[in-house]
Image (cartoon, grey):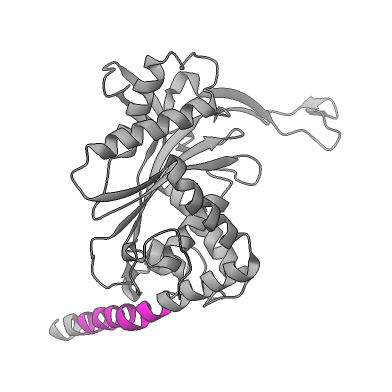
C-alpha cells in the first residue's frame, strides 16, 4: 500500500528485511527546550567537555542528552498510540517488563528479554549536545515541599524538606540526528510521527521537561552520516562567526534554524556516500504530507495497522526462529553438562 507520495519508493523496502540492506533515512532534528527539563544521571545534569567548534578550537563544557533520554519518550509515544487504537498485541506490551515482540515498537526500536529473545534496534540515536556552553544553559533552583496550608511551617516547626536542583534553561538547542535503518513506508512514518508528537523528555516528565522537535531535514542514503557533535560544532562556528552567540541571552531560534540548515548542507556536501537531501524548501512538501497523514485519524490508523502488519510478519519469520534456536541451544548445553 502506497502511503506517501513526496518521496521516491526506491528509498523504502516493501517489507522489513532480516539483514542490513544499506538503506538509511536520517531525521535531522533540533530539540528545543521550552521549559526546565532535567537530563541527568546520579542527580547531576549530564555534560561533556568537548571542542567548541570545528574551526574554533577552544574547549568548553556542553550539556549532553544521552540517547536513552531521546529514544525512550519517542517509543513510548508510539506505544501509547497503539494502545489507543488497540492495534497489535498492545495489551501484552509493558515497557521494560514484557514485550509482545511483534509490534512496530518492538521491531523498530528493539527489545531484550533475557533467554526469551532480543531484537536489535533499527532506530539509531546518539548523544546530543547543547550548542551553547553548560554555564549559559542551566540554572540552579531551590525546591520545597509545603504543608497543606501552603507554608513551610506547621505547629511552630519549620520543615527541612528543601533542596536545590540544576535545571536546563528554556531555548537551549540540542541538534540530533535520528537514523532509521532499512525503512518501509509505514516504518518511516511511524518513527517520523513519534519524533513530531513527543513533547516531554528527561526526568519528572509530568511536571517539566517540555521539549519541541523542530525538523530541519530528512536525508536518504546508503550509509550513516555526520555525528551530532560535529553538526553542533559546525552550527557553533557559523553562529559565532556571525556574532549570534551573546551569553547570557538565549539563542534566536530563526538564526539557529538557518545555521543548522547551512551546517548540515555543508557537512553533507563532504560526505562520501550517495544521498538525497530534503532540506529547506525541499522539505516543506514532505513535512506537509506527513503532517496531513498523522493529523487525520483514519490515515493515521491505516499507517499504524500497516506498520503492525509488517512487524508481525517480520516477527513470525525471524523472531520466533531466533527464540526457538536459543531454547534449543540452552537445552543442548544442559544435556552436554
Image quadrant in which the C terminus is located: bottom left
The relative height of residue 18 versus residue 29 in the rendered view (above or below) is: below
* Nearer the observer, 227 or 35: 227
What residue is at 26 percent from the left and 20 percent from the top? Answer: 55
Write down the quadrant of residue 22 in the picture.
bottom left
Camera sees residue 175: yes
Image quadrant in which the N terminus is located: bottom left
Give the x, y percent position of residue 88: 52, 77
User: Is residue 324 part of the magenta span, yes or no?
Assistant: yes
What residue is at 56 percent from the left and 27 percent from the top? Answer: 169
Left of 280 or right of it: where is 295?
right
Write down the quadrant of residue 130 in the picture.
top left
Left of 33 or right of it: where is 218?
left
* Nearer the observer, 279 or 234: 279
What residue is at 45 percent from the left and 68 percent from the top? Answer: 186
Give the x, y percent position of residue 137: 50, 24
Residue lying farthest to the left in this orientation: 336
The relative height of residue 31 versus residue 83 in the rendered view (above or below) is: above
User: Is residue 220 part of the magenta span, yes or no?
Assistant: no
In terms of secondary structure, what is the magenta stretch mainly? helix
Left of 113 or right of it: where is 335?
left
Q: Which residues are magenta?
A: 312-331
Amino acid at each position: 500500500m502506497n502511503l506517501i507520495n513526496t518521496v521516491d519508493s526506491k528509498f523504502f523496502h516493501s517489507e522489513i528485511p532480516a539483514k542490513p540492506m544499506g538503506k538509511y533515512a536520517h531525521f535531522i532534528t533540533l530539540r528545543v527546550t521550552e521549559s526546565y527539563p532535567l537530563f541527568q544521571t546520579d542527580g547531576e545534569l549530564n555534560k561533556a567537555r568537548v571542542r567548541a567548534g570545528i574551526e574554533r578550537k577552544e574547549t568548553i563544557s556542553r550539556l549532553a542528552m544521552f540517547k536513552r533520554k531521546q529514544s525512550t519518550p519517542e517509543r513510548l509515544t508510539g506505544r501509547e498510540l497503539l494502545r489507543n487504537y488497540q492495534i497489535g498485541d498492545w495489551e501484552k506490551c509493558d515497557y521494560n517488563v514484557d514485550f509482545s515482540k511483534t509490534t512496530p515498537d518492538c521491531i523498530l526500536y528493539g527489545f531484550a528479554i533475557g533467554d526469551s529473545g532480543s531484537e536489535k534496534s533499527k532506530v539509531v540515536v546518539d548523544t546530543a549536545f547543547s550548542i551553547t556552553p553548560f554555564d549559559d544553559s542551566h540554572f540552579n533552583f531551590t525546591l520545597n515541599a509545603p504543608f497543606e496550608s501552603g507554608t513551610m511551617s506547621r505547629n511552630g516547626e519549620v520543615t527541612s524538606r528543601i533542596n536545590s536542583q540544576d535545571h536546563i534553561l528554556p531555548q537551549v538547542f540540542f541538534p540530533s540526528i535520528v537514523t532509521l535503518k532499512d525503512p518501509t513506508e509505514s516504518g518511516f512514518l511511524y518513527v517520523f510521527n513519534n519524533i513530531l508528537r513527543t513533547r516531554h523528555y528527561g526526568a519528572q516528565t509530568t511536571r517539566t521537561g517540555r521539549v519541541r522537535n523542530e525538523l530541519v531535514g530528512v536525508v536518504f542514503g546508503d550509509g550513516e552520516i555526520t555525528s551530532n557533535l560535529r553538526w553542533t560544532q559546525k552550527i557553533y562556528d557559523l553562529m559565532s562567526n556571525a556574532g549570534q552567540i551573546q551569553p547570557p541571552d538565549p539563542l534566536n531560534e530563526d538564526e539557529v534554524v538557518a545555521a543548522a540548515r547551512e551546517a548540515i548542507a555543508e557537512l553533507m556536501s563532504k560526505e562520501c556516500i550517495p544521498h538525497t537531501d530534503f532540506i529547506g524548501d525541499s522539505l516543506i512538501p514532505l513535512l506537509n504530507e506527513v503532517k496531513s497523514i498523522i493529523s487525520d485519524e483514519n490515515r493515521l490508523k491505516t499507517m499504524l495497522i500497516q506498520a503492525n502488519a509488517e512487524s508481525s510478519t517480520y516477527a513470525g519469520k525471524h523472531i520466533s526462529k531466533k527464540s526457538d534456536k536459543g531454547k534449543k541451544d540452552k537445552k543442548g548445553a544442559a544435556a552436554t553438562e
